[in-house]
Image: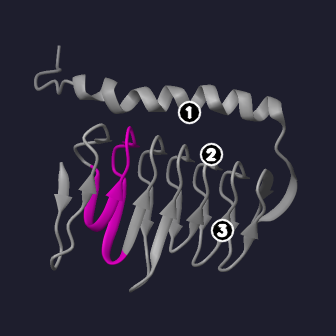
Amino acid sequence: MGIYSFEGRIPRIKDSAYVFPNATVIGDVEIGEQVWIGPGAVLRGDYGSIYVGDYSAVEDNCVIHARPGERTYIGKHVTMGHLSVVHTGTVQDWAVLGMGCTVSDFATVGEWAAVGEGAVVKSRFSIDRESIAVGVPAKIVGKITEEYKNLWVDYKRNYNTFSSRYRNLQKIENHFI
């Protein structure tokens, strides 16, 4: 596992969280209960700080970073889709970030908001709670329904189980037939 201190900044990871062996966590990073950090993810708190709230999923190859002296905040029950990036942004509880999206400096994604795949949330832009935003740059195009919430609660529960299920991951050394 790539977990590193940097100039006295030491990651703080709850015992129930799971960090994939080839993910990288550096410096001032706090990871909450039952968080799942996927393959290739990079959380770099080298000169800024990062907080990832309980029950969140940071999927494969996500990048989380913060500007010097600033903080990136990922709330509870957040799903960060594959290849998404959050840089000095705030993502509130239950939000969903689509694959390959970017949340830029000082932008905010509200509670239960959804950012579409490949969208770019520009610096200082705010997506209201329960809103859907898509495009480059991201624009609000709709509202989250109760049906959507129910569906995503189930998806999020599945990722919550990964923090314990992945502890049984077994590397196969000789996989050739």
Q: Is residue 45 magenta?
A: yes
Asked whether the viewer can see residue 164, the reply is yes
Residue in view at x 60 percent, y 78 percent: 106
Determine the residue located farthest toward the right in the rendered image.
142
Which residue appears at 34% of the width and 44% of the height? 39
- For label 1, the residue is 156
Please state which amino acid type lies under the numbered disc 3. Thr
The picture quadrant where one finds residue 152 is top right
Label 2 neighbour load within 10 Å: few <14, some 14-19, many 20+: many
Q: Position of residue 129 (x, y in %)?
A: 76, 56
Residue 75, labelled with which disc?
none
* Magenta stretch: dominant secondary structure: strand
Distance CA(mark 3)–CA(mark 1):
21 Å
Numbered mark located on residue 108 in the image: 3
- 96 horizontally vs 165: left or right: right
Camera-nearest residue between 37 and 34:
34
> What residue span does the magenta drawing correspond to?
23-48
| Residue 74 within the magenta-colored segment of the rendering | no
Mark 2 and mark 3 lie on one chain; the one further toward the N terminus is 2
Residue 30 versus residue 155 in the image, above or below: below
The residue where tag 2 is placed is 94
Decide: is 31 above or below 140. above
Amino acid type at image mark 2? Trp
For the residues bearing labels 2 and 1, Cβ distance under 8 angstroms: yes
* The residue positioned farthest toward the left in the image shown: 174
